[in-house]
Amino acid sequence: MSQKKQDILSVAERLFYEYGFRGVGLKQIIQEANVATMTLYNHFESKDNLVAQVLKQREARYWRYLDSYVDKHPDKPFISAVKAHCQWLNDYSYKGDMFMRAIEDYADTDNEIESTARGHKARLLHYLEKLANDAGIDNGYDLAVQYTLLLEGTTSMTALLGSKEATAHAIIMAKLLLHEAHNQ
């Protein structure tokens, strides 16, 4: 990827996160990325295409985060996934979830943006279900749903409690869910 394209993506992601997808125009992105208008259009055919690419870049970063934590502690994949998610919230999502914003802003528009954002949420559920099945937990789907709800709730509560307090509660709840799953 060219440096100019990466600059545009980085600036767009920051601005979209801070001001929302509808609150930022291409002119502002071009100005802050310090690129020519044609440079932006050489890399992205439209604002919607730029938003979709920002979400894909953000999602890839999220999965690298999650995978690196889980890979470091394969004996505790669920707790590692929760810690990774909480660290992600602290580092990248302290003001809420960009994927949920995309779902809300682009709902029922039948486009790549909503599909990418919904796909991210579905992938999280499937990822957690695989962890449960790999751990030999009966009815791994139910545990995956519970953990997905826990992570989504933690994301919401970060805005209210801050990431450290939300993380502390999330880890306690994660351990309780895991304990319950093993004792069924």
Image (cartoon, rainbow, N blue to C red):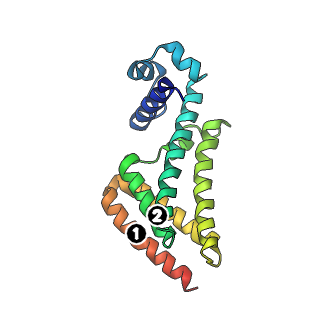
| Quadrant of the frame with the C terminus | bottom right
Q: Nearer the viewer, residue 173 or 53?
A: 53
Q: Is residue 85 left or right of residue 183?
A: left
Q: Nearer the viewer, residue 14 or 142?
A: 14
Residue 74 percent across, percent down from the top left: 51, 69
**Going 61% across and 54% down the picture, which residue do you hit?**
123
Q: Given this view, does label 1 or label 2 mark the residue nearer the observer?
A: 2
Q: Secondary structure at mark 2?
A: helix
> Closer to the camera, 84 or 29?
84
Residue at image coords 61%, 43%: 116
Q: Earlier in the sequence, mark 1 or mark 2?
A: 2
How crowded pointer 2 is (Cα within 10 Å; few <14, some 14-19, many 20+) is rated as: few
In the image, which disc is placed on residue 72?
2
Q: Which residue is mark 1?
A: 171
Q: Would residue 17 appear left or right of 47 to someone viewing this image?
A: left
- Amino acid type shown at disc 1: Ile
Q: Residue furthest bottom?
A: 183
